[in-house]
Image (cartoon, rainbow, N blue to C red):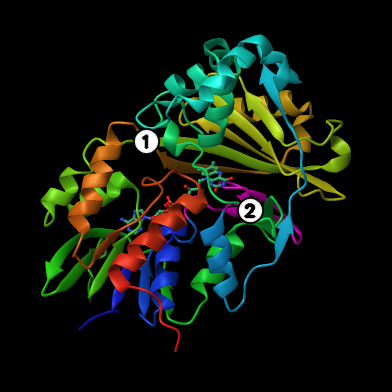
Amino acid sequence: MRAAEHIVIGAGISGLSMAHYAAARGIPTLVLEAEDRIGGCIQSLAFQEDFWVEGGAHTCFNSYGHLLELLQQLPSPPTRVPKLRRYYQRWQGGQRRSLLSALHPLELLLALPRLATVQKSGRTVADYYSRVLGRRNYQDLFRYAFRAVICQDADAFPAELLFRPKPKRKDFPRRFSFSGGLSRISQAIAAQPGIQVRTGQRVAAVHPQGEGFRIHLESGEALECRWLSLAVPPDIARQLLSESFEPLAQELAGMEMAAIDSLAFWVPAQALSLPPLAGLIAWEQDCYAIVSRDDLPHDRYRGFTLHFRADALSRDAQLATARAALGVQPEAIRDPVWIRNRLPALRVEQQAQVQRLTERLQGKPLAIVGNWFFGVSIEDCLMRSYEESLRLFGEVHAD
Ligand SMILES: Cc1cc2nc3c(=O)[nH]c(=O)nc-3n(C[C@H](O)[C@H](O)[C@H](O)COP(=O)(O)OP(=O)(O)OC[C@H]3O[C@@H](n4cnc5c(N)ncnc54)[C@H](O)[C@@H]3O)c2cc1C
């Protein structure tokens, strides 16, 4: 017997948005999540009743049109809170400095006209931005800024997928979060009628079953469905497909992930003399960025999340970095939490693979969604889920 008409594997924002788009068409959906919480790379840590710090994604923008539309469709949407404009500084050699002090203005002036002629398509971040910003500007400034955005080395990342231009909704604040943090998005989607979420359910394999699918959980349980959506990282999708869907699995070969170790904590506001800032972009080998939540100020607390190359520094060394960068005493760092996330390490040559994968899916009751089709932002995830939901289920018809 079918467990649900539609099963989604993975309860990150890609899987939850896919569940939303199916439920909006009246298709009951079961979401299976390996971990004991939903949200994947979205994880808001509630330290005090009205104070949270983001362990993963931290900001949404008014260019997130699919997200804004989805939120408007929710019966109980989370409460949006605008974020203040704050500025980043750089953290280099034990000192905080302005970002502009690393800029070569003359080189920038000479390079910028190339924006009109140099194509992003088919170029790496290093290649494209060295041309349009100047080679020294890229090496001395922008490569660190871009690393901080995607929490991994940016040089070989496809330029097209770093900042995809998206129309801005001027009726919304430019940057925002939600009261309680971004996890409220996941919770509000999952709480809708027509969506059931089971956590602690790691899927081991998927097989064809009649016109649908049979899903095998690590626990030994098997579940059947008519439509299936994979919303897991590409290396996991490959494993799940490898036994029965070899041609699809082949297209996922060589797709690597970058692991990120993050340290999040709060600090009593009076323990810190550092002026409010967006964060510090690190010019260090093993640390990408120190993100503050001063853009959502609080009277008594300040919060920070440091993002490190995975397995590079011990926990003590990470705490020492935090103390040095913020200029605080050890006892000021409260309730430290360590988190491991993974993001796809996208490459230019894989874009053709992803295109072939999408073509191979045509006509199949199987969707593959995630942050490795259009880019890694939350909106990029929703764009892919929206497209796949149209292919699988067609347009939504108002009753
Ligand atoms: C540190 C950091 C900061 C970021 N900042 C921003 C930001 O400010 N703004 C922005 O727009 N984006 C940001 N992003 C990117 C964005 O958060 C992610 O790209 C997005 O949340 C990924 O969602 P996803 O659902 O595709 O994947 P994931 O969130 O990785 O979800 C995949 C889910 O699948 C589950 N899973 C895996 N294997 C199995 C299995 N076998 N069976 C069942 N379940 C399984 C996982 O447990 C996970 O819950 C950031 C990401 C990170 C890591």
Image position, residue 322 (x, y; %): 68, 29
Q: Can residue 187 be spotted in the picture?
A: no
Quarter of the figure that contains the N terminus:
bottom left
Q: Which mark is residue 62?
A: 2
Q: Residue at x 62, y 16 (%)?
A: 108
Q: Residue at x 51, y 78 (%)?
A: 192
Quarter of the figure that contains the C terminus:
bottom left
Q: Amino acid at mark 2?
A: Asn
Q: Earlier in the sequence, mark 1 or mark 2?
A: 2
Image position, residue 396 (x, y; %): 41, 77
Could you tell me which secondary element the residue under label 1 belongs to?
A: loop
Q: Which residue is mark 1?
A: 346
Q: How far apart are labels 1 and 2 at the CA level?
A: 25 Å
Image position, residue 218 (x, y; %): 25, 61
Q: Quadrant of residue 88?
A: top right
Q: Which residues are magenta?
A: 40-63
Q: Is residue 125 above or below residue 397?
A: above
Q: Residues within 10 Å of mark 2 (few under 14, many from 20)?
A: some
Q: Can residue 197 be spotted in the picture?
A: yes
In the depicted view, which residue is nearer to us: 187 or 354? 354
Q: Amino acid at mark 1?
A: Leu
Judged left or right of residue 155, residue 6 is left
Q: Residue at x 34, y 30 (%)?
A: 122
Which is more foreground, mark 1 or mark 2?
A: 2
Q: Residue at x 68, y 53 (%)?
A: 176
Q: Is residue 249 above or below residue 215?
A: above
Judged left or right of residue 293, residue 18 is left
Could you tell me which secondary element the residue under label 2 belongs to?
A: loop
Image position, residue 230 (x, y; %): 30, 59
